[in-house]
Amino acid sequence: MNSLWSWWVIIGTVVSIIACVWLIVFTNRQRASKEEIVESEAHVWDEDIRELNNPLPMWWLWLFILTIIWSVGYLIYYPGLGTFSGTSEWSQEGQYDAEVAAAEARYGPIFAKYGAMEVTDLVNDPDALSIGASLFANYCSQCHGSGALGARGFPNLTDDDWLYGGSPAQIEQSIMSGRTGIMPPLGAVFASDEALNEMVSYVQAMPDGMDTSSPAHTQYMTLCIACHGADGSGMQALGAPNLTDDIWLYSSSPQQIRKTIVEGRTGAMPAHGHLIGPDRARVLAAYVYSLSQ
C-alpha cells in the first residue's frame, strides 16, 4: 500500500470514529420541547406512554461508548490504520507461519516415520491409510472426487487404468512433481469432414479391435502411432492413453472424440511436493495405490 492510500485509510477511519462520538454527544443532548410535550398529549398509548424526542437510555449509551473505546484500542494494538502495523506487529503471514510451525512440530515426527517406510508396507497400515484419506480429501478430492472416481478430464483412481503408471514410485512422482499431458490439435490435418468423421469412428471402435481396412487406419499410423503406439495401447512415459480398453477420460461420444482430435487436450496435474513434502506425499501415494488394489 502506497503512502497516499495509507493516509486515505487513516483519515477515513479517524474521521468516522470522531463522527460517531459527535453523533452520540449530539443525540444525547436532545430534549423534547414544550411544544412537543403539548403535542404528544394526542399520542398517548396504554395511558402513560408518550411519543417524545428523549435521549437514549444510559446503559444503551454506554454500550456505544464502549464499542468506540474498543475500536480505538484495537486499531492501536492490531494493524488497521493504513501501513501502521500496530503495537503487536501481528500479521496474517506471521500467524500462518506460526501455526504451520506448530503443526509441523506436532505431526512432523509421525510423517517422518511413515516417510521412511515403503508404500507397499504403508498399504497394510490402517493408521497410515486413515491419514492418507484425510490428505486426499484436502488436496485431491476437488478434482478426482471424494470417492476418487474422477470426472470428465480427471482420471478415476480406483481402477487399474493409469496414464503415467500405477506403481508406487510412479504415483509418488505424480504427486510430488505433477504431470502435464498434451494432445496436439489435428483438425487442420484432415482434408475434409468425411476424413475426420472416419477417424472419429475408427477411434471410437478401437476397443473392439483395430479396423485395418478403414481409410482412417493409414492416418492413424501416420498421425497417432508416435504417442498411442501401433496397437493403440498408449504410452505411459508420455501420458498417452490406451485407446483399446474402453476407458475414456473425456467420454467416448463422437462429439467428444471429434473435439479431442480437432482442438486437442491439455491435462495438468499440479505438483504438490512444495505443499506437502516427501513424507506426506508417500502416505498419500500409499492411499491412492490402495484404491486400485
Image: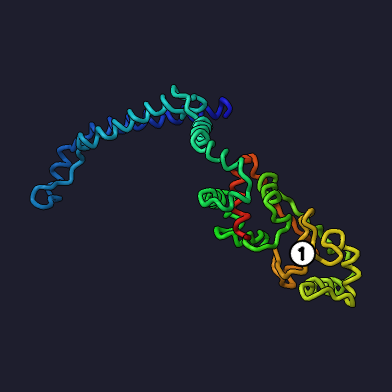
Tag 1: residue type?
Asn
Estimate the x, y position of residue 103 in percent, counting from the top left: 50, 36
| Residue located 39% across and 29% down the image | 74
**Residue at x 72%, y 50% (from the top left corner):** 179
For residue 112, side relative to residue 227 (left or right): left
Identify the residue at image location x=57%, y=38%.
112
Residue 1 vs residue 92, the one in the foreground: 92
Quarter of the image for the N terminus: give it: top right
Q: 78 or 111, which is in the foreground?
A: 111
Q: Which residue position holds label 1?
A: 242
Q: Quadrant of residue 211?
A: bottom right
Q: Is residue 264 visible?
A: yes
Against 65, residue 175 (above or below) is below
Give the x, y percent position of residue 218.
Answer: 91, 70
Q: Residue at x 88, y 71 (%)?
A: 217
Q: Count up the numbered dots.
A: 1
Tag 1, which secondary structure?
Answer: loop
Horizontal side of residue 3 vs 191, given as left or right: left
